[in-house]
Image: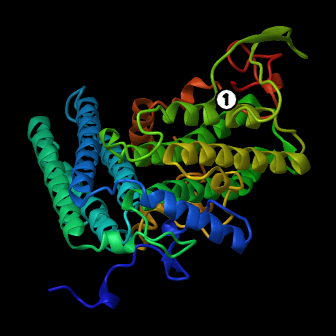
Amino acid sequence: MRGPRKSRTSFRPSLNENTLEERVVLSTGTSAHVSTLGRTVAAHARSQPTLSRRELNVAFRDQLRAAQAQLKQFMNTQLGVLFANGTPSASQLAAFRDQITGAIDATAFRVSSQLALMPGATDRLVAQVQNNLLSNTGRGLTGRVNQLIVRLNGSPDRLLSALNRVSDAATIQNVGQTANFLRAAPINRLSIDLTTGQHIPVQQFMAQQVVSQFGNTLGSLATSFPNVANSAIFTNGTLSTDPAVQQAFANQLMSAISVATNQLGNNLAVFPNNLRLFPGTGTDILTPASHIFFGVSTTGTGTGTTTGTGTGTTTGTGFTNLMAALSSVPTTSTAFFPAVNTAFNNTFSNVASTLGNFFGFPSTMTSTATLPTGPFSSVFSPTFSTFGNGFNNGFGSGFLGFGTNQGGLNNFLASPLSNGFNAITTNQNLLLGFNPSGTGFTGFGGSSLTTGTGSTGIGGTGGVV
């Protein structure tokens, strides 16, 4: 029997009785403009087919199984590494456990973002799925994995079989709970356009959630950026010219950006292409989105100021892509942070416009889109807000994995936990078509801070177009 409402797990804070991930951040116009625009959106939405519960169930079942397959592949690969040289040591087992924990965290991030697109899912379904994956008790996948590593670390075959078995069980549970939610939840009644209060098809509500989640995630990263950068690459207001310092922070930032692209790409993967739900169905939306972040590699030459010539890239005029914009920001602290903020704002505006065209939003709905400045929410429920010694809240910076951990390291890739998370998200990004590692971004202030050849060689402008 279902308990009273007040006893249920709350997934995240609320604002004006709407969970933060269910706020629409697409327009900053006047109230009259928003009202007129909302009516236009609602009228357009009513002309579209409605995504049925059965179709939603199939779509989410496929996504849950795909996430499980990638997690199992990672576990199997890491298990082979663990026993490559015989029986592992205690420290190797501990590192293996942390890597698997990070991979499960990444899986929870992916499926939580996807399920939270549905109306009414955050307080019920998402919290249940996170408990299934992240709980450190005998009921959660993380807890079961930890127990198995302790019990079966002397037998790789038995451990592999057991890991696959508990992973299968968690996915079966997640698929079943999603099906139960879709049978019982009033998702059509809850599919409301928040600017007008009018009912819209569920897929249109979910489309607005894709943009809202992306804005929340990128806005949180942009807001966290100054604090992390000040501690990592600035000394008394002066940007470090040490290539090692620049590279370490560039790696950290690229990993944080990959979190945003991972969420965006996986959220878009929820919508079945064969149903033609949106005007852009059948077109490639991920490639232009990837170009807004990372650009298209080109080559050019320029004269270096310190060590001769090298191969660089051309950027053209105006905003080209996030990596090119970041690599060429001014190096003084007074100009650096406003330029970085502008780069993030342009990225959000361009991605929102691209998504708007795909989903069929009126152009006026995204032409004024601005990057949110808060309040922000984590995709993880309060129950798991401190997993990974603060990894979830950016070690205090406010963005997932972006900051300085308790060991004093400010590189996202430094800890085994982060390695597991990053390995899963990186692999997924490559499958989705996002390739951050191919950009050659190594630091700020143009290519004068780097040496060698490639997309950021001396004399070029850095980044890609």
Q: Is residue 147 left or right of residue 256?
A: left
Q: Residue at x 19, y 62 (%)?
A: 179
Q: Is residue 234 left or right of residue 411?
A: right
Q: Position of residue 439 (x, y in %)?
A: 62, 26
Whether residue 424 can be seen here: yes
Quick one: quadrant of the C terminus?
A: top right
Residue at (64% x, 68% y) in the render: 36
On the rendered structure, is 355 left or right of 85?
right
Work out whether residue 99 or residue 335 is closer to the camera in this orientation and state it: 335
Q: Residues within 10 Å of mark 1 (few under 14, many from 20)?
A: many
Q: Does 213 appear above or below 453?
A: below
Q: Is residue 406 visible?
A: no
Percent of width and height locating residue 421: 42, 45
The quadrant of the picture occupied by the N terminus is bottom left
Q: Which residue is mark 1?
A: 441
Residue 69's image quarter? Answer: top left
Numbered disc total: 1
Q: Is residue 274 left or right of residue 295?
A: left
296 lies above or below 388: above
SS at badge 1? loop
Front-most of residues 442 and 63: 63
Q: Position of residue 263 (x, y in %)?
A: 46, 48
* Image location of residue 389, percent across then percent down: 47, 61
Q: How is the image coloured?
A: rainbow
Q: Is residue 329 above or below residue 333?
A: above
Amino acid type, residue under disc 1 in the picture: Phe
Q: Which residue is depicted at the point 34% across and 39% down?
A: 273
Q: Is residue 323 above or below residue 371?
A: above
**Residue 215 figure quarter:** bottom right
